[in-house]
Amino acid sequence: MRKAFIAVGLTAILCLMLSGVALGGRPGPTGTVSGTVKDISTGAAVAGATISNGTVSATTDANGNYTMNVATGSNTLSASAGSYITTYQVCTVTSGITTTVNWSLTKAYGNQAIPAAGMDYTILAWNDLGMHCDQDDYSYFMVLPPYNTLHVQIQDRNGRNNPIMSGVTVSYAFPKKTNSALHTNWWTYQSQYGFNQPVNVGISGTPLAGDMVPDANNLSWVAEGIPITPYDDDGTWDPYGTATITVKDSAGNILQTADVVAPVSTEMTCSNCHGTSNPQLDILQKHDEHNGTTLATDQAAGKVHACAECHADNALGAPGKPGVENLSLAMHQFHAGKAADTTDGCYNCHPGPKTQCLRGIMERAGKGCVDCHGSMAQVASSIVNGRNPWLEEPRCADCHDAKHAENDNTLYRNSVLQNGPNNTMNGKLYCEACHNSTHAELTTAISADASITQKFQGDNYWIWNCTVCHTNKRQQPMHK
Amino acid sequence: MKSRHLLLIALFLTGLSLFLYGCQANSNSASPKALLDKYFSSAMKQDYATTYTCYYKAYQDKVSQEDYVKHRKQASILRSYKVTSLKQSDVTAQAEVLLTFAPSKKLSRNKPVTVRAKEDLIKEDNQWKIKVW
């Protein structure tokens, strides 16, 4: 009898154990994540780094390599190592497939004295896109006119009513780019492209130097459509020209000044495919051959066309002609397969192998154009499937954790802080104010990008030290 | 014999002095003015490879001579220059220069055009150079 009770009891325990497994005690499906951890500046392997999804973790070996099994689905991974800033990436893990997640870690912040500590006002300034395209010659066609945009947010380090949007005058000027007409023929042809501005004034009416105005959100001062070119007055090829921003009070006293870069390049290497003798004419002739247009004949007769005349272009707000593909679709669809789907491939048309439109921290960490935008065929198909080019672009949140995501239905360049350490900051500080332009997120490969952080924070990092903008604050996490 | 030796030594020293003076006068680093002269006169001759040598290291690190020459040819041709002011400290200098660019068919410019430009100079490895950023 006693043996029977023991047998029944053991059987019951076994059944409970088995049922427990069946009801959820058994681990779910897993997939493998592996990769390498490197130092972003030197490229050296980081040994002993910890990769974790909060549940399981792995440590890198002497070569910086790691492998770990994690639950399938979306995982937010972190990478931490002694003297580096902890970094996060989102990855989707599939059962039976090894997902590669590589890391390039940035050294921890320095302990330098913060230069802004001795100042009353801080200027946070940036260019909107990280790079604007320009053309050396407008006598054949126009893709984009000279056009650059600067934003400025002013912080009163002793005040609470930031950013300052009244009682000041904010002006900009490019000391070495005072006369774009010296080196471009844009103003000779602008009327044929539908514009009629005075020389050295951009298509939106913005001159090479002047006062900035409040933006549509009344959060920053903006100069939109500045017609600078990559040529300094003396002819120097300078795609990283800097503007001097000057903030004055209502009495005309200078409160603060700072330099900010406004990148612009003509490095569209059409000649790689369209011949070196006259690539612009070759483009027109090819267009005529394929589409039955008369662009080359028109050009020979002195009549030139903007691409946006027929192809809708959100960059210019041009509606195009009914039944004609928008410019972004036409370009990517036609050229897909004709150039490699790599950053170098993109640099055949976008500036460029020397200019380096893509040069921010993600590029330094090994990411290329295609990692965010997809291949040319994917760019084209996304438009076919309804994406609005220029207005709907890759999202930070696709790779970064929710704390570092941009605002819902808003591009990074228009997004503002929503999870700051102090609620009064939320909705006021642009992402680009601290992290710099898209494509050129700090820290970048070009020293000119970091002129603001150099002046006010004393390093090339994004704005991480609260002392930059506040007299009574020290470093704390910027994103709650 | 002794006086001949002395004469030869004197001639040698004189020649050496003249050589060194000539080197200094021709160097792009002797003074800010000398650098500006080399910078603009080479541009006037469209000898942009020489113009390129006048830039400081940060620019040359970013822009190769080949790329510089290629892009500089796209900009206007310098016809003349005149340095109107030059302020110099130990390691930096600022100049204002009147630059006159030639007429250009590409730019539909029938007459020369003059602009007042600013130049920043920096002393790098004991040589004066044009600073861009």
Image (cartoon, rainbow, N blue to C red):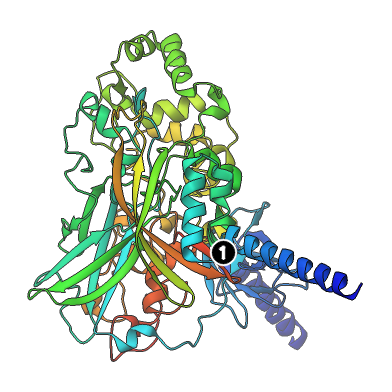
Q: Which residue appears at 55% of the width and 75% of the height?
A: A54
Q: Nearer the viewer, residue A15 or A67?
A: A67
Q: Which residue appears at 66% of the width and 69% of the height?
A: A18
Q: How many marks?
A: 1
Q: Which residue type does callout 1 highlight?
A: Ser
Horizontal side, residue A344 vs residue A9: left or right: left
Q: Which residue appears at 51% of the width and 43% of the height?
A: A352
Q: Is residue A146 among the parts visible in the rendering?
A: no
Q: How far across and how far down the image is residue A322, in percent?
A: 25, 19
Q: Quadrant of the N terminus of chain A?
A: bottom right
For label 1, the SS is loop
Query: Up-down: is A441 above or below A117?
Result: above
Report which quarter residue B119 is drawn in.
bottom left
Query: Up-down: is A252 above or below B22?
Result: below
Q: How far across and how far down the image is residue A111, in percent?
A: 49, 88
The residue most toward the bottom is A472
Report which quarter residue A457 is drawn in.
bottom left
Q: Nearer the viewer, residue A105 or A21?
A: A105
Q: Is residue A3 among the parts visible in the rendering?
A: yes
Q: How far across and how far down the image is residue A430, in percent?
A: 29, 65
Q: Quadrant of the C terminus of chain A?
A: bottom left
Residue for badge 1: B29
Query: Up-down: is A374 above or below A311?
Result: below
Which chain does the residue under circle 1 lie in? B
The residue most toward the right is B1
Query: Up-down: is B76 above or below B99?
Result: above
Q: Nearer the viewer, residue A283 or B133?
A: B133
Q: Residues within 10 Å of mark 1 (few under 14, many from 20)?
A: many
Horizontal side, residue A14 vs residue B100: left or right: right
